[in-house]
Amino acid sequence: MSNAMIHVVDDDASVRESLCRVLELSGFTVRAHASAGDFLMDWPSNDTPGCVLLDVRMPGPSGLDLQEALSHRHDAPPVVFMTGYGDIPMSVLAIKRGAVDFLTKPIEREQLLAAVNTALERSQERAEHEQRQRVARERFERLTARERAVFEQVAVGRLNKQIASSLCTCERTVKAHRANVMQKLGVHSVAELVRIAVQLETHD
């Protein structure tokens, strides 16, 4: 993932430098931060794929505090935690909150790269999901009010006859609207149309 950005957040300068060196030699673009606050001030809020290597225990806001803050952002990058302590309850909490992994220092190169690659895969999946949602929303906005009404009823499995009755129109008109809906949404089956409906609900 050539455009991905790996953020290393750790108050220990030697740890930051060591991790950045390993990641850069492995072909990643890396940015280092000395604290959770520095990361939040420097982090660009956009859809650039990436992840955060995050120390758990830091002066000021902790790694868990930062994870909690990021959890409220739709564009939050996946988090890989790092710790010098074998704190099992803390690791369980971090994973429950969505962390990709919980690594114990000193971190082996292979273990580090495996966690980063897993996090980047999750980041890419999220980006692709959000792109599908954007496309679905843009296409949905092209529908007329009557086409949206037909769309909503087709999506819940209603037949043309039932839709015609509820909209006080004839089946032929419903069929015409339905064809327009399929064409504007770029789908070829009811199953695809239902997936669009699910994406729109998730977006909302």
Image: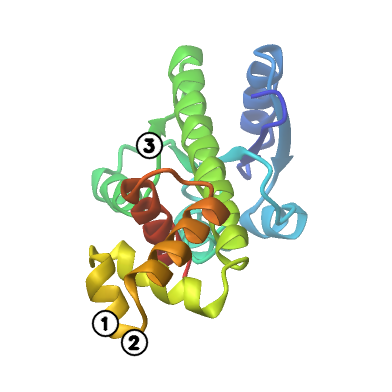
Give above or below for 56 relative to 198.
Answer: above
Disc 1 marks a residue whose amino acid type is Ser
Asked if the residues shown at circle 1 and circle 2 are in contact, with their CB atoms under 8 angstroms apart, the answer is yes
User: Which residue in the structure is indicated by mark 3?
Assistant: 102
| Disc 1, SS | helix
* Pointer 2 local density, CA inside 10 Å: few below 14, some 14–19, many at least 20: few
Q: Is 101 situated above or below 139?
A: above
Tell whether 41 sits left or right of 115.
Answer: right
Amino acid identity at mark 2? Cys
* Residue assigned mark 1: 165
N-term mark: 2 or 3: 3
Q: Are marks 2 and 3 in contact (CB under 8 Å)?
A: no
Disc 1/disc 3 C-alpha distance (Å): 57 Å
Query: Which numbered disc covers residue 168?
Result: 2
Q: Nearer the viewer, residue 21 or 171?
A: 171
Tell whether 24 sits left or right of 132.
right
Mark 1 or mark 3: name the one nearer the start of the chain: 3
Question: Viewer-nearest of labels 2 and 3?
Answer: 2
Q: Nearer the viewer, mark 1 or mark 3?
A: 1
Residue 121: x %, y % from top left: 49, 30
List x then y, in percent, for residue 29: 73, 27
How far separated are the C-alphas under marks 2 and 3?
A: 59 Å
- Please rate how many residues cluster around mark 1, counting C-alpha atoms within 10 Å: few if below 14, some from 14 to 19, many from 20: few
Give the amino acid at mark 3: Phe
Taking the image as shown, residue 31 lies to the left or right of residue 90, namely: right
Who is closer to the viewer here, 127 or 153? Answer: 153
